[in-house]
Amino acid sequence: MGLLDHPLISRIRRNHALEHATIHILSRRYRNLHVMGQSMPGGFILYGDVSTDAVMEAAQEALERLRAGQRELAVHPTCGTNAVVAGTLAGLGAFLVLSPRRRNLMEWLGRLPTVLLVATLGFILGQRLGLALQSAITTDPRVDRLRIVAIAREERGPLVLHRVYTEDR
């Protein structure tokens, strides 16, 4: 058994896929909707002001569509995986351009265009690599045994969140 198949990690990956699929469906239904998610072994949390009924309907549809083979719903362009990979590549590229030698301020400033170019390319490449990592590592659209057992709404001042609880059948 590989690390990705460990029961705890596998549950998180499947819930992550369901979270993304739910966000895709909500975003298509409600233009200009701003939601974020966080996956865990027992389900996922959606942060954003949306009705509980809408979350339930979208999550159920997401589960059905993933089961029907719509694997592309498991990957989302605004996932934190993309941000981490893009930021890491941009930062690493900038570090490599600036760090090999000590330079005076004028030499350092002269390298700034190269740093910006490398960081921008790292960011662009990181976005694409992040999507590939989501597909291969951080999500798993095989949700056949997953079921939604409850959704709980919480309001913390202006913050609205929904906890979507899942379990394996």
Image (spheres, rainbow, N blue to C red):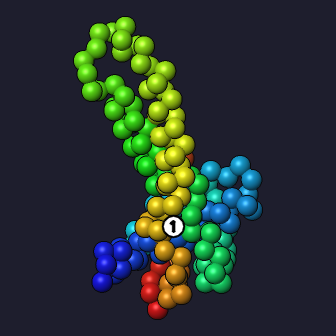
Which residue is at the front of the view, 54 or 108?
A: 108
Query: Which type of secondary structure does the marked residue at label 1 adopt?
Result: helix
Task: Out of 156 and 89, give the one closest to the viewer.
Answer: 89
Residue sitting at x 46%, y 61%: 133
* Outermost residue toward the front in this view: 101
Decide which of 5, 98 is in the foreground and name it: 98
What crowding class fits label 1: few (fewer than 14 Cα within 10 Å), some (14-19), or many (20 or more)? some
**What residue is disc 1 on?**
135
Q: Is residue 116 above or below residue 76?
A: above
Can residue 83 be seen? no
The answer to whether residue 111 of the structure is visible from this angle is yes
- On the rendered image, what quadrant is the N terminus found in? bottom left
Q: Position of residue 2 (x, y in %)?
A: 31, 78
Q: Position of residue 93 (x, y in %)?
A: 39, 36
Which picture quadrant has residue 63? bottom right
Q: Is residue 28 above or below residue 124?
A: below
The count of marks equals 1
**With 116 as the anchor, is 73 left or right in this view?**
right
Rendered position, 95 above or below 107: below
The residue positioned 42% from the left and 48% from the top of the image is 84
The x and y percentages for residue 38 are: 46, 60
* Residue situated furthest left in the rendering: 102
- Which residue is found at the position 27% from the left and 27% from the top? 100
Q: Measuring 60% from the left and 74% from the top, which residue is drawn there?
A: 71
Position of residue 45 measured from the top left corner of the image (x, y, whole percent): 48, 63
Type of residue at label 1?
Ser
157 up-or-down from 57: above or below: above
